[in-house]
Amino acid sequence: MRRQFGKGFSVHFADSVQEAPADLLARAHEVLVGIASSLQGIPARSALWREMGAGNAELNLAGWRFEYRVDRRDRRILVVDAQRAGA
């Protein structure tokens, strides 16, 4: 699943993430689209970029944990893992 926002960030899911329920993948995509949109307004010198480059972020939805990273250079969000919480 991929969606591009002009010169903004795109959202991608690793193939292994497809094991999560389809409705949950759609909801995660929707939330990440909002995050991608908001990233466009962050100043280039913001400390947030340094923190995002330091490791992965987490999105928790309906008992699932989606782990993702923000690649500023390639202007994309990549979901690298999805697991049922507590698993």
Image (spheres, rainbow, N blue to C red):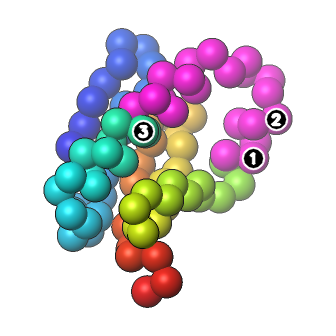
- Amino acid type, residue under disc 1 in the picture: Glu
* Residue 11: quadrant of the picture: top left
Of the two numbered discs 3 and 2 on the same chain, state the one appearing first in sequence: 3
- Marks 1/2 in contact by CB < 8 Å: the verdict is yes
| Residue at the spot of label 3 | 31
Residue positioned 68% across, 21% down in the render? 42
x, y percent for residue 8: 45, 20
- Marks 3/2 in contact by CB < 8 Å: the verdict is no
* Residue 1: quadrant of the picture: top left
- Amino acid type, residue under disc 2 in the picture: Ala
Residue positioned 58% across, 26% down in the render? 39
| Residue at the spot of label 1 | 51
x, y percent for residue 28: 36, 48
Residue 45 visible in the current orientation: yes
As measured in the structure, the alpha-carbon distance from the residue carrying label 3 to the one carrying label 2 is: 22 Å
Magenta-colored segment: predominant secondary structure? helix
Circle 2 crowding by C-alpha within 10 Å: few under 14, some 14–19, many from 20: few
As measured in the structure, the alpha-carbon distance from the residue carrying label 1 to the one carrying label 2 is: 6 Å
User: What is the secondary structure assignment of the residue under circle 1?
Assistant: helix
Q: Does residue 9 sit above or below 76 in this rendering?
A: above
Q: Does residue 56 sit above or below 85 in this rendering?
A: above
Segment tinted magenta in the rendering: 33-52
Circle 1 crowding by C-alpha within 10 Å: few under 14, some 14–19, many from 20: few
Identity of the residue furthest to the left in this view: 22
User: What is the secondary structure assignment of the residue under circle 2?
Assistant: helix
Of the two numbered discs 3 and 1 on the same chain, state the one appearing first in sequence: 3
| Residue at the spot of label 2 | 47
Quadrant in the picture for the C terminus = bottom left
x, y percent for residue 53: 67, 48
User: What is the secondary structure assignment of the residue under circle 3?
Assistant: helix
